[in-house]
Image (cartoon, coloured by chain):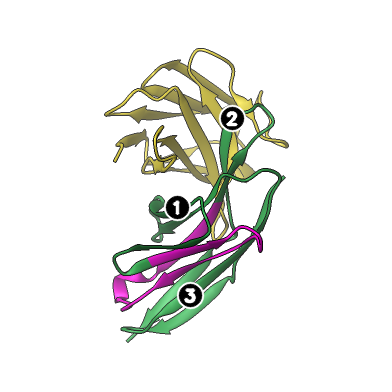
Amino acid sequence: GQSLEQPSEVTAVEGAIVQINCTYQTSGFYGLSWYQQHDGGAPTFLSYNALDGLEETGRFSSFLSRSDSYGYLLLQELQMKDSASYFCAVRAPNSGGYQKVTFGTGTKLQVIP
Amino acid sequence: GAVVSQHPSWVICKSGTSVKIECRSLDFQATTMFWYRQFPKQSLMLMATSNEGSKATYEQGVEKDKFLINHASLTLSTLTVTSAHPEDSSFYICSTRDRNTGELFFGEGSRLTVL
């Protein structure tokens, strides 16, 4: 099976940079994704890493090290609207040969003025 | 990206009744849809993978007779919570997956409260 660990809560100041880490254990691995979820809403896709290294998309960047089973999401120039929960998610094969996505425990980010 | 519509957004029902939640893929044909459940302040837990024209694949610990999934067309999957009990109260979210990128697109979610 799969298990993913993230810090439960992070607080950062508006305009600052914050890094949210994710470590995972999985049998089979295609890649690591990140999703953002505001309270009461559905998750939205942020990024995906299949290979080692850094992927940058605007203010958000995501890093993966497959040998360390580790990744992180980096948020720069934090804005108040970035306050949300962030989930890492592993994409891996399931027993039926399909691809399934398993979510981490989630990190609640609070951005303060 | 894909557009997924889920209905109803909110539902309150009495214990023992059944509730049906619909998930529609509005702009592409989805042979596979995923149903997740999320309890307050917790992560999304995959319940089952819905396959068009065949039986759903349930995750370990999910009762297939209690959570009935039907994927009768390429644009519609339904989840029926049968004989609902208060412990079934949760946020149920469906998703489709982009075939090229693997990105998940989620519906708006359905918040079920069982009294």
Name the residue beneath numbered marker 3.
A19
Which stretch is magenta? A61-89
| Residue B18 shows in the view | no
Q: CA distance from mark 2 to mark 1?
A: 18 Å
Identify which residue, B77 or B19, lies in the foreground: B77
In the image, is residue B51 part of the stretch drawn in magenta? no
When asked about the image quadrant of residue B94, the answer is top left
> Three-letter amino acid code at disc 1?
Tyr
Chain for disc number 1: A
- Is A50 left, or right, of A83 in this rendering? right
Taking the magenta stretch, the answer to whether it contains residue A66 is: yes
| Closer to us: B106 or A59 | A59
Q: Which residue is mark 2?
A: A98
Up-down relation of residue B52 to residue A24 (above or below): above
Q: Secondary structure at mark 1?
A: strand
Check chain identity for marks 2 and 3: say if they share one: yes
Under mark 3, the amino acid is Gln
- The residue at which mark 1 appears reads as A48
State which quarter of the image contains the N terminus of chain B.
top left
The chain coloured yellow is B
Quarter occupied by the C terminus of chain B? top right
**At 65% across and 34% down in the image, what residue appears?**
A94
Task: Name which of mark 2 and mark 1 comes first in the sequence.
Answer: 1
Eye-nearest disc, 1 or 3: 1
Q: Quadrant of residue A104?
A: bottom right
Mark 1, Cα crowd under 10 Å, few <14 / some 14-19 / many 20+, is: many
Lower sequence index among marks 1 and 3? 3
Residue B95 as seen in the image, left or right of residue B68:
left
Assign a secondary structure to mark 3. Answer: strand
Q: Position of residue B110 (x, y in %)?
A: 43, 41
Indicate the chain on which mark 3 is placed: A
Query: What hue does chain A carry in this figure?
Result: green
